[in-house]
Image: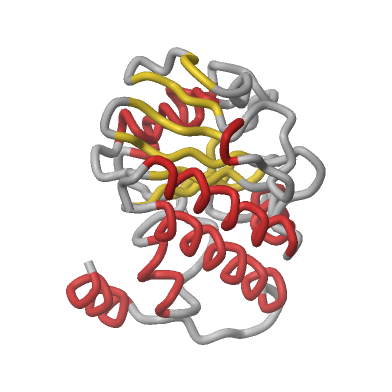
Amino acid sequence: MSDEPELREAICTLAASLFGRGFSVGSAGNISVRLADGFLITPTNSCLGRLDPSRLSRLDAAYRHVGGDTPSKEVFMHRAFYAARAQAQAVVHLHSTWATAVACLDDVDPGDPIPPLTPYFVMRIGGALPVVPYYRPGDPAMEPAIAERARSARAVLLANHGPVVSGGSLTDAVYAAEELEEAAKLFMLLRRDRVRHLTSDQVADLHRTFG
């Protein structure tokens, strides 16, 4: 999907779906897509459930605002992923409940807090899911911290804040964000129980098969 009007419509449709299912509330969360000559991103203080395709923020290749409403104040978060991952074509940031809950835990591995419970989590998110240390929302110092981890990870959890997920397309990024939320929910529901994780061989087989 590379036609800009089509991408504008898709952003709004998928954002409304995420909002309607509680993956974001109020004006929380933002979505961006890479274009041939720039980027589209949801506007600042906008609600993912009520976006207008014509009012999405248009940025040029240097991330300067060139059209639409004022962009999200968290543009730097998206820029960190695009700079670190040439294959990233879209970025989704949510405040989804279960993933944010994991991001608040103090007794998990900050390099990889969610174990491989299902093949779908491994297939959508890939390897590690690092936790970025806490920064005040909107703090540009978060950008290099995200970029450092994004070089080897498709997604990160922002401590006490929420997930940021990249994908090879808009739908890939949204599906990955949804799968991350489900994996986080499973982890939180099962974390005090004895569970069967996928083995390292099973995880390696998934990576060989699905990339």
Q: Look at the picture and state if 86 lies above or below 67.
A: below
The image quadrant where one finds the C terminus is bottom left
In the picture, measured across the screen, residue 194 lies left or right of residue 76, that is right
In-front residue for pair 155/76: 76
In the picture, measured across the screen, residue 193 lies left or right of residue 12, that is right
Q: Position of residue 89 (x, y in %)?
A: 34, 44
Q: Position of residue 124 (x, y in %)?
A: 40, 65
Q: Most extreme residue toward the right, as rendered?
A: 26
Q: Position of residue 72 (x, y in %)?
A: 61, 26
In the picture, measured across the screen, residue 206 lies left or right of residue 59, that is left
**Colouring used for the render:** secondary structure
- The residue shown at (59%, 56%) is 13
Q: Look at the picture and state if 209 lies above or below 63.
A: below
Q: Most extreme residue toward the left, as rendered?
A: 208
In-front residue for pair 166/198: 166
In-front residue for pair 48/114: 48
- The residue shown at (54%, 17%) is 141
Q: Quadrant of residue 74?
A: top right
Q: Position of residue 203 (x, y in %)?
A: 31, 75
Total numbered labels placed on residues in the image: 0
- The residue shown at (49%, 43%) is 8
- The residue shown at (72%, 34%) is 46
Q: Quadrant of residue 43?
A: top right
